[in-house]
């Protein structure tokens, strides 16, 4: 019998916020809290770690959620601009060949 993985589940921001608060205030380990909530221990650990970073308590150099979102947006924008430059370069080469005929 196969057990369905939680890796594809999405949790609401409110659920994550409540789970983090419970993990921080509970006398239980993160693994025990995760088991009680029905989430993977690694997911809860990641949420707690990210919450620490967002509060400025993380490891030096660790990105906050806002910084991660901005980095993702900037990477996407850079990729789109690179594609645009590539297309324009091909179009320039095509029209240069056409005008030389």
Image (tube, rainbow, N blue to C red):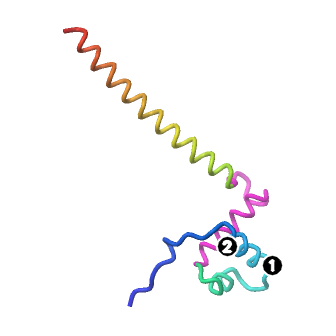
Q: Label 1, on which residue?
A: 25
Q: From which residue to which does the magenta span run? A: 40-64
Mark 1 secondary-structure assignment: helix
Q: Is residue 90 left or right of residue 30?
A: left
Residue at image point 60% right, 72% down? 43
Residue at image point 40% right, 86% down? 2
User: Can you say whether 84 is above or below 59 in the image?
Assistant: above
Within 10 Å of disc 2 (Cα), the crowding (few <14, some 14-19, many 20+) is few
Residue at image point 62% right, 85% down? 35
Where in the figure is residue 12, as x and y percent of width and height? 63, 68
Residue at the far left: name it: 101
Q: CA distance from mark 2 to mark 1?
A: 15 Å
Sequence order check, earlier mark of 2 and 1:
2
Where in the figure is residue 3, as x and y percent of width and height? 44, 85
Within 10 Å of disc 1 (Cα), the crowding (few <14, some 14-19, many 20+) is few
Residue 15's disc is 2
Where in the figure is residue 40, as x and y percent of width and height? 58, 78
Q: Is residue 55 left or right of residue 32?
A: right
């Amino acid at each position: 019998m196969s057990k369905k993985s939680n890796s594809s589940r999405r949790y609401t921001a409110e659920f994550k916020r409540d789970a983090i608060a419970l993990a921080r205030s509970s006398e239980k380990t993160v693994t025990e809290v995760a088991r009680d909530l029905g989430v993977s221990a690694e997911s809860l650990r990641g949420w707690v770690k990210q919450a620490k970073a967002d509060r400025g308590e993380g490891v030096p150099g660790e990105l906050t959620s806002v910084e991660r979102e901005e980095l993702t947006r900037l990477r996407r924008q850079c990729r789109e601009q690179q594609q645009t430059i590539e297309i324009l370069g091909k179009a320039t080469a095509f029209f240069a060949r056409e005008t030389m005929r």
